[in-house]
Image (tube, rainbow, N blue to C red):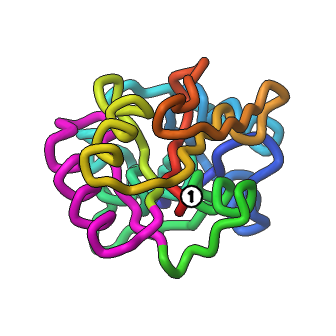
Amino acid sequence: MIIVGVGVGPKMLTREAIEAISAAPVIYGSERAIELARDHIKCEAHPIKSFKNLHLLPADAVVLSTGDPMFSGLGKFAGEHDRVITGVSSIQAACARFHVEMSNLAMITAHGRDPAPAREALIRELSMGKNIFLLPADNFGPAEVAGILKEMGIDARICIYENIGYSDERAATGTLSEPPLNESDVYCLMVVR
């Protein structure tokens, strides 16, 4: 199996990803991932909702993963002999958009999971002086992050980046007293000092 990162928006496919997708005998992925790669798909593409059974797919299957498979993506399901092709991640796009150097950045995800560990990681990383990149959850977004920053006495910008790479892409920056509000469920958040 090959797990291919298709990037976070249109026009973010790498040459290596395009070659793997074009040569694929069969493709699986979320509807969004398939749509991002649609122009390069030359075989049957099967939307799948649950990725927990990827190991049951044919050995020559190409599985599309939005963003980069190794950051909160499908790379975690790769077997020892599977190949993983990187993609442009939301973290790369957000750092470029907000001019944030990645070397002092902590990556945290609450996406699709219990946000309690993400909250703990946020507090730990902020106490070490890091900027933060967060994939939020419904119950752990800009307002909750602003509350934690206030509790810790840290003044910082809170930035959100929505629908990255799409025509309705939106970036917004706010303060602790007025954090930016997301208008989409597809967004990431940054805390920048």
User: Which quadrant of the structure image shows residue 171?
Assistant: top right
For residue 117, side relative to residue 156 (left or right):
left
- Residue 126: in magenta span: yes
> Residue sitting at 62 percent across and 32 percent down?
44
In the structure shown, which secondary structural element does the residue marked by tag 1 occupy? Answer: helix
> Residue sitting at 50 percent across and 54 percent down?
156
76 or 80: which is nearer to us? 76
Point out residue 36 in the picture as x, y percentages from the top left corner: 71, 37
105 or 73: which is nearer to us? 105
For residue 70, side relative to residue 166 (left or right):
left
Residue numbers of the magenta segment: 105-131
> Residue sitting at 75 percent across and 63 percent down?
14
Quarter of the image with the N terminus is: bottom left
Q: Residue furthest bottom?
A: 103
Residue tagged 1: 91
> Residue sitting at 70 percent across and 56 percent down?
98
User: Which quadrant of the structure image shows residue 135?
Assistant: top left
147 or 29: which is nearer to us? 147
Can the viewer see residue 55? yes
Point out residue 148 in the picture as x, y percentages from the top left corner: 28, 44
